[in-house]
Image: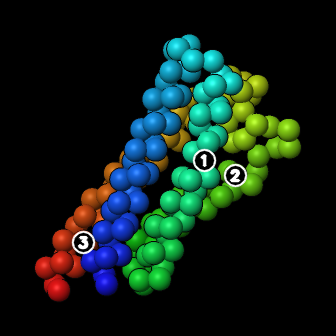
Amino acid sequence: MEAAVFISSLVDCCALIFLSVYFIITLSDLECDYINARSCCSKLNKWVIPEMIAQALATVLMLVSMHWFVFLLNLPVASWDVYRYVKVPLGNMGVYDPTEIHNRGQLKSHMKEAMIKLGFHLLCFFIYLYSMILALIND
């Protein structure tokens, strides 16, 4: 049971790493003017809810399996994703809005957030991998 929790968390984490890299590449393309703001934001907004669901899934899995340290590690990121989604102003296209992405340094802050999430998901990947191996050895 414990190994299955960490295997599914590992797969979930791989998907989140892929999404973080996708966000970084897409935001870099916007920064270099390879794509316009509207297509960039529509591409990124399409993946905001799946990212939020995947992060919540990992958090809930750790809560249900009573791995408190990893649960508390995941909780702030899951909370931040929900907060960001709920705080989108009315009239905006989504979390990433093409009319505001170049204003007030939002592009840089979105890029910084994507980099931090990538680092966080890489850290979680190795924690899940170690815990999975430990659970498989103990079974």
Name the residue carrying label 1.
48
Alpha-carbon span between mark 1 and mark 2? 8 Å
Q: Is mark 1 on a helix, strand or loop?
A: helix
Q: Is mark 3 on a helix, strand or loop?
A: helix
Amino acid under disc 3: Met
Of circles 1 and 2, which is in front? 1
What is the total number of numbered labels drawn onto the structure image? 3
Question: Can residue 115 be seen here?
Answer: no
Name the residue carrying label 2.
85
Q: State left or right for residue 47 relative to residue 86.
A: left
Name the residue carrying label 3.
132
Q: State left or right for residue 26 relative to residue 101.
A: left
Mark 3 residue crowding within 10 angstroms, few (<14) / some (14–19) / many (20+): many
Q: State left or right for residue 90 relative to residue 73.
A: right
Question: Can residue 37 be seen here?
Answer: yes
Looking at this view, is 82 or 40 the one in front? 40
Amino acid under disc 1: Val
Mark 2 residue crowding within 10 angstroms, few (<14) / some (14–19) / many (20+): some
Asked whether the residues under the numbered discs 3 and 1 touch, taking CB atoms below 8 Å apart as contact, a structural biologist would say no
Q: In which quarter of the image is the N terminus?
A: bottom left
- Which residue does the image show at 43% across and 75% down from the upper left? 62
Q: Quadrant of the C terminus?
A: bottom left
Asked whether the residues under the numbered discs 1 and 2 touch, taking CB atoms below 8 Å apart as contact, a structural biologist would say yes
